[in-house]
Amino acid sequence: MGTGKGDCEHRCRNTCAMLCDALQDEKKKITYYETMLTQCDDPAMQKFVNEVMELHKTLVDRITEKLNVIRANAEVLDGIITSFEG
């Protein structure tokens, strides 16, 4: 899953390519674990998989929050730049 396909461009403004890749990777992991849950009927394994899945859901939430902060900061900067141009 984590193949290192994203390269940091060091010029992030409204988003971060590497965080977007990480977000997609975490979502794929959640989908994988959901598939595991449908195929496995062992209660102990289901409990474990649910716990692991919750960790990845928490990461999805945190990455999404960070991307939202990056976008909000970019909007503020765009507003400041626009005010100087007009």
Image (tube, rainbow, N blue to C red):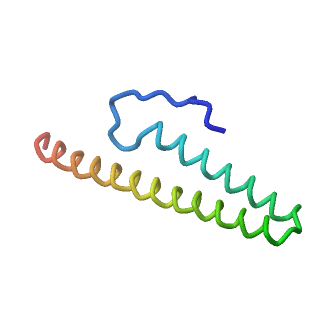
Q: Quadrant of the N terminus?
A: top right
Q: Is residue 43 left or right of residue 59?
A: right
Q: Residue furthest left?
A: 84
Q: How many numbered marks does the figure carry? A: 0
**Front residue of this view, candidates 29 and 84:** 29
Query: What is the residue that sits farthest to the bottom in this orientation?
Result: 43
Please determine whether, in this image, residue 39 is positioned above or below residue 77.
Answer: below
Q: Position of residue 84 (x, y in %)?
A: 10, 42
Q: Nearer the viewer, residue 33 or 68?
A: 33
Quarter of the image for residue 56 reads bottom right
Query: What residue do we see at 16% from left, 47% from top?
Result: 80
Locate residue 80 relative to residue 74 in the image: left or right.
left
Percent across and percent down for residue 20 are 50, 43
Q: Locate residue 59 relative to residue 47 in the image: left or right.
A: left
Depth check, front residue: 83 or 62: 62
The relative height of residue 65 versus residue 25 in the rendered view (above or below) is below
Residue found at x 13% / y 47%:
83
Towards the viewer: 28 or 74: 28
Residue in the image at 57% along x and 29% along y:
5
Q: Is residue 40 above or below residue 86?
A: below
Residue most toward the front?
44
Q: Quadrant of the image for the C terminus?
A: top left
Residue 60 location (% of width, % of height): 53, 57
Q: Position of residue 48 (x, y in %)?
A: 71, 64
